[in-house]
Amino acid sequence: MSQANEMTGAESLVRTMIAGGVDTCFANPGTSEMHFVAALDQIPGMRCVLGLQENVVTGMADGFYRIADRPACTLLHCGPGLANGLANLHNARRAGSGMVNIVGDQATYHAPLDAPLTADIEALARTVSAWVRTSARPQDVGQDAAAAMQAARTIARNLATLILPSDSSWGRGGVVAEPLPKLRAPAIDPHAVEAAAAALRSGGPNVLILLGGRGFRAVSQRLAWRLAHASGAAILGEFVAPRVERGAGRLPLERIPYDTDAATKVLARYTDIVLVGARPPVSFFAYPDKPSRQHANDARLHILARPEQDVETALAAVVDALGVPDAAYPAGADRPQRVTGKPSPEGLARMLASVMPEGAIVSDESISFGRGLYAETHGAAPHDWLHLTGGAIGDGLPVATGAAIGAGGSRRVISLQADGSAMYSLQSLWTQARERLPVTTVLLSNRKYNILIGEYKGVGAVPGQTAMNMLDLSNPGIGWVKLAEGMGVEAVQAHSLEQCADMLEASFHLARPFLVELVI
């Protein structure tokens, strides 16, 4: 190990991050990062998790943050490595997940020569990052890392990317920086509190409290319920939901539907919408002759708290302004009994609720098959539900993997995974096996891009043979049991709900990952 006065930039980076509480690194390194890898090897305190593709790496960091409530770092190789991870960085940005991306780059004197891997990393990083900086000298690396960690701990706008030229990494003169204080969230506007309180006083059932971000956490749900119970207002969550605390003893909260016609119908009656960490509801895409905004044209939108503000504080301020008492939640649904028969969305939901262990984490990328899972799972044991937030498919398996690590391996993760999007990041299974993570994957095998078939019809296009062939995954069929086993994960195939339930319950007793291909 180098002496303090001869510390490399890479060594100062590792020591600064460990001192600042960032102790997990999801990595897919290359040549320009080798001195950082060497520092990770020599300095104890950082858990390093290898991902076989960068979109797995960034997705794991997203899942880690959602459960651990603190950032990890990623290690990515130059511009192409960052580019490979951009889809799940997009999802992480929409989820408000903090992380520090360490991206290796050409040495400062080598970059002007335009070697093959040279790229405009800052431009790529700014598409998903709220904070971007390049450390030009070894002496700057520690303080830059401290600033990156500070940015990664802010609310909502917290993706930080630190670009590390290889000579800044291997060069001497690195200095360990002290952790910087956590930045305060923007203050809640008293006028926003007054406006929300006024709407709740007068609007009754025509007022909607719309939760987003940290509004899905149990404490915020409790405060929102007190307001709704006292005023007669309704509560919904926005469709984009990073982490929902739900199950028995919690609010049976529903989200705005994905389908724009259904969403417009649900929202039509509300004259006032109080936004609590949520954005105004709009459809995922534009459709011919359909509105982009899902709420009524004359609805009044009251922004109580923006996503980057403290949602809990905002709700508590309105509770105080109205002087509303605590209120018990409505009687919850009973835990469903075990179900049998052919797989269906409702049957899958009931089966899952009947076997789910307390404290489970559900990583949901079930896509079209899973749209109705909420209504049938309110009575399940208390659990956390993690959703695809940015619409870029391929996050379910990596988020499940990172969530298991974020929970310290103490909670069972159930990964509900559509087959088409699973192919984007199936390398996650290898990391699950390597780390012996308690993840059970339910691979929903319908052998087609079913969501795109629905979207094809939704935009008014007439389906034909060529189009349907492009959305078909059955020729040839994907052998998920063999793929999983090839990644080191034990796997079986199930054709009924009772078979799937038996396999799930057996897997919950394993200290390793397991996959059930449910043929639907």
Image (tube, grey):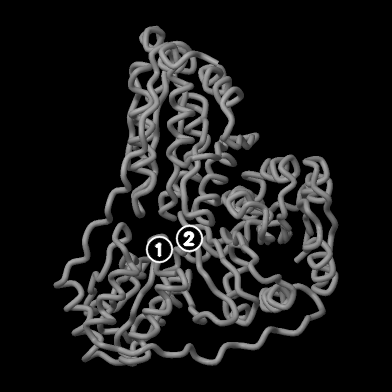
Q: Along the line of sight, which residue is nearer the eye, 161 or 187?
A: 187
Which mark, by number, is residue 242?
2
Question: Looking at the image, can residue 121 be seen?
Answer: no
Instruction: Name the spot of residue 357 as percent of width and height, x first.
Output: 70, 70
Residue 492's x, y, as percent? 85, 57
Give the Cα separation between the discs numbered 2 and 1. Answer: 6 Å
Residue at position x 44%, y 51% in the image: 97
> Can residue 248 be seen in this snapshot?
yes
**Location of residue 10 with respect to 93 vertically, above or below:** above
Q: Which of marks 2 and 1 is nearer the N terminus?
A: 1
Q: Is residue 389 left or right of residue 492?
A: left
Residue at 41% of width from left, 54% of height from top?
Answer: 96
For the residue pair 204 and 335, the one nearer the viewer reads as 335
When the figure is inspected, residue 13 is found, relative to residue 139, above or below; the finding is below
Under circle 2, the secondary element is loop
Answer left or right for 89 relative to 416.
left
Q: What residue type is labelled 1?
A: Gly
Kind of residue at badge 2: Pro
Asked whether disc 2 touches disc 1, contact meaning CB atoms under 8 Å apart, the reply is yes
List the residue tagged with mark 1: 213
Q: Which of 381 and 28 is in front in this view?
A: 381
Instruction: Please tell me whether residue 104 is drawn above or below residue 276 in the rendered image.
Output: above
